[in-house]
Image: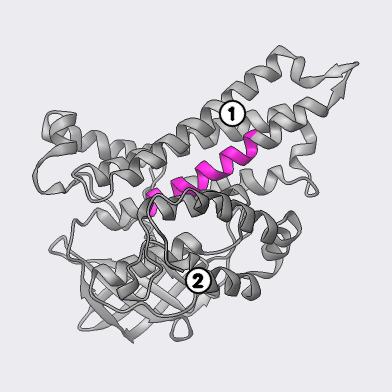
Amino acid sequence: MSLQDSDVSIASFMEKFFAETCPQEVVGWAESHGLDIGLWSQVDELGLTLISIDEADHGSGGSLTHLVTMLQAAGRNAAPLPLADTHLAAWLLVQSGQNVPAGPATVVPGTPRDTLEYVDGRLRGAAYAVPWARDADTVVFVVPAESGRLRIARAKRTSLQIVPGTDLAGMSCDTVSADDLEVDASWWPGDPDAPAARGALLRAALMAGALSAIFEMTTKYCRVRVQFGRTIGSNQSVQQHLVNLAQAAATSAAAVDQAAMAAGTQGEIFASFAAKVVAGREASLGARAAHQAHGAIGLTKEYRLQQLTRRLHTWRMEYGTEEALAQRIGASVVQHRSLMTFVGRRQGTTEFSTPTSGMRGRV
């Protein structure tokens, strides 16, 4: 599938596709059984798995804006697919001069507990909380070197030891181990914060989509639910919940869109981290407002709200919490003495002075 810039039909097509292929029953099945290979084949055939990867690199073409549009549609429908993870893996490999393998892929996000190291062409150690690891064909590792640079390594899932786990959303989130495994690896050529920033932006896009669906769902519910002879939406306290949800959805979408448009500019990394901070904060407020407006029904398995809010809380913790990213941004602003100098200095790089352990920031 080749995407054309400024094609306004892309958003509506993706929304319709995910709405039709990812109903509540399909999402529930995936939480119990893992990746639906048939569903993955559909998105792969449409080229949705490699949007914004150049066609010369066997991708689908298009821009980062097209990618976040697709992820927002996926987030709105709680699509149980490693779309963000496969894109991130492909982008890391292409940027580091490696080819993109077929099939679903994931990236080791990095946690303080990880013990991974790359020595003399071999990978050893363990990585924790790796999304979709047991469902991926390829696992990509971002391994820091003593010089401060990064290596991008890859391995087939079948060559790794995987201990299954699940996240709050019910999706696979596993421990991955390598025992002196020979792997292909390349030096990361750009800013060492760029991989984490791209991962943060993609999670923010998913959250923005989910928040928009939660707002629409809650608004509809409050219009039809009658209590004490009138709709609950006429209650002032419930109206405040709806206002909070509207603000959360709009603010998150605006931050994500702004970050996507900053691709290739001097402020790209700052905008991506800032979008994740905004989306994470709004996800917390929005999930709480939605459940307060719905009451107990919002927590039931039969109602879709909990599928979306559980994902919001999962995505908030990946590729940097609000607190962790805000600290990184704040420390760098202090280092550069002004926000404008930090965001817009020469060569388009954004270095963060706060030490990190991999790409998943935690406080």
Q: CA distance from mark 1 to mark 2?
A: 33 Å
Residue occupying the point 82% across, 28% down: 224
Give percent across and percent down for residue 70: 50, 54
Q: Which residues are magenta?
A: 199-215
Please tell me whether mark 2 sits on a helix, a strand or a loop. helix
Residue occupying the point 16% across, 31% down: 340
Q: Quadrant of the C terminus?
A: top left
Corner quadrant of residue 21: bottom right
Kind of residue at disc 1: Leu
Q: Visible in this render: residue 272? A: no
Question: Which residue is tagged 2?
Answer: 133
Kind of residue at disc 2: Ala
Corner quadrant of residue 257: top left
Residue occupying the point 40% across, 36% down: 255
Q: Is residue 218 above or below residue 307?
A: above
Question: Which residue is tagged 1?
Answer: 245
Q: Is residue 51 above or below residue 309?
A: below
- Residue at the limit of the structure toward the left, as seen here: 346
- Depth check: give the residue in front, 243 or 284: 243
Q: Visible in this render: residue 260? A: yes
